[in-house]
């Protein structure tokens, strides 16, 4: 079964799209099957994967408004390596149309269920808002990846995001967790960056990825060529950082899986032991 992650932060320009595209490419480079879903009507992630948002015959809009199946809109990223559900400004209309549709919060979850068996990871890029689109993503996902720039106002906006996550957890998706907090455009020479970073670690502990994404001009240049940074300049600091993030994510996923397996084995053993104990207690009586 695939791991579905939503890249969200209602604050604009913090590196959501850069993370969605480059994490998808880096996970693909580690031999994982990846689907990236562009849930932002700006279509930046679509363009960043080398797909022209102006040329789309079908897009995520058609899926969410039940005009076609998700399999009909999936395309390969321009440089290969991973698949994309592309988007353009049509998706703005979906926001309005969804409001009067049944199951408006679960439409993306239902659509992804049709294809999730084909992927190890599904990465969803969100718009900078806590809109119905972002709600759809959080209902579909198991975890939220929060990119953050370590600056003064960064922590302020976080409480609204936490409240939204809690609300969705208590109503539509009890499995939802904060997967991790990613420090983006990180500059260790800036004392404000290190102060905010320390606060983040105090507050969120090991939810903060140990990988940080440095400010790197190659990351900003790559989308204009429709390429993930790995295909644009694989030796750049940005490319190396996103590869490290993919590695950290794979390790975390693996250790969570083995912890869950261990817990379920223990449960079986405890259950069996309980049965044996009660049987022997019965026979002694
Ligand atoms: N680590 C980085 N180093 C340098 N530039 C970066 C880095 N990460 C992102 N950028 C640049 O910063 C700008 C904002 O990044 P991005 O589009 O990924 O943010 P976003 O959170 O998706 O924005 P929005 O909220 O508008 O969707 C872009 O021009 C991008 O190229
Ligand atoms: Mg974006």
Image (cartoon, grey):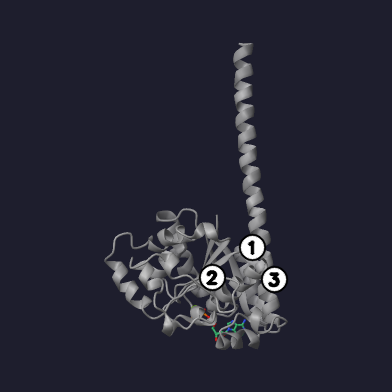
Out of 108 and 264, give the one closest to the viewer: 108
Q: Nearer the viewer, residue 64 or 198?
A: 64
Query: Disc 1 marks which residue?
Result: 205
- The residue to which callout 2 is attached is 83
Gap between marks 2 and 1 measured at Cα: 33 Å
Helix or strand or loop: what does disc 1 sit on? helix
Q: CA distance from mark 1 to mark 3?
A: 19 Å
Quadrant of the image where one finds ligand 1: bottom right
Secondary structure under tag 3 reads helix
The image quarter containing residue 100 is bottom left
Q: Are marks 2 and 1 in contact (CB under 8 Å)?
A: no
Ligand 1 closer than 8 Å to label 3 CB: no
Q: Which residue is mark 3?
A: 244
> Given the current orientation, which residue lies at the most extreme right position?
235
Of callouts 2 and 3, the N-terminal one: 2
Of callouts 2 and 1, which one flags the residue occurring earlier in the amino acid sequence? 2
Position of residue 105 in the picture relative to residue 80 (left or right): left
Q: If the image is split into quadrants, where does the C terminus sit?
A: top right
Quadrant for the N terminus in the image:
bottom right
């Amino acid at each position: 079964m695939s791991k579905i992650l939503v890249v969200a932060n209602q604050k604009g320009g913090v590196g959501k799209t850069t993370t969605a595209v480059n994490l998808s490419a880096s996970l693909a480079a580690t031999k994982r099957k990846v689907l990236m879903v562009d849930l932002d009507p700006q279509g930046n992630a679509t363009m960043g994967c080398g797909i022209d948002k102006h040329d789309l015959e079908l897009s995520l809009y058609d899926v969410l408004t039940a005009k076609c199946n998700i399999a009909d809109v999936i395309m390969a990223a321009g440089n290969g390596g991973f698949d994309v559900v592309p988007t353009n400004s049509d998706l703005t209309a979906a926001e309005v149309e969804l409001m009067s549709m049944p199951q408006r919060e679960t439409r993306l979850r239902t659509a992804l269920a049709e294809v999730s068996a084909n992927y190890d990871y599904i990465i969803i890029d969100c718009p900078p808002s806590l809109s119905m689109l972002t709600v759809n993503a959080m209902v579909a996902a198991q975890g939220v990846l929060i990119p953050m720039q370590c600056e003064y106002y960064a922590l302020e906006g976080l409480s609204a995001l936490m409240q939204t996550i809690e609300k969705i957890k208590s109503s539509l998706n009890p499995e939802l967790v904060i997967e991790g907090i990613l420090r983006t455009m990180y500059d260790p020479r800036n004392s404000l960056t290190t102060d905010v970073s320390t606060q983040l670690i105090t507050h969120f502990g090991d939810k903060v990825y140990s990988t940080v994404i440095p400010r790197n001009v190659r990351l900003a240049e790559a989308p204009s060529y429709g390429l993930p940074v790995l295909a644009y300049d694989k030796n750049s600091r940005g490319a190396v950082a996103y590869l490290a993030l993919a590695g950290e994510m794979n390790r975390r996923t693996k250790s969570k899986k083995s912890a869950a397996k261990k817990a379920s084995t223990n449960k079986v053993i405890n259950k069996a032991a309980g049965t044996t104990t009660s049987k022997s207690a019965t026979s002694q009586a």
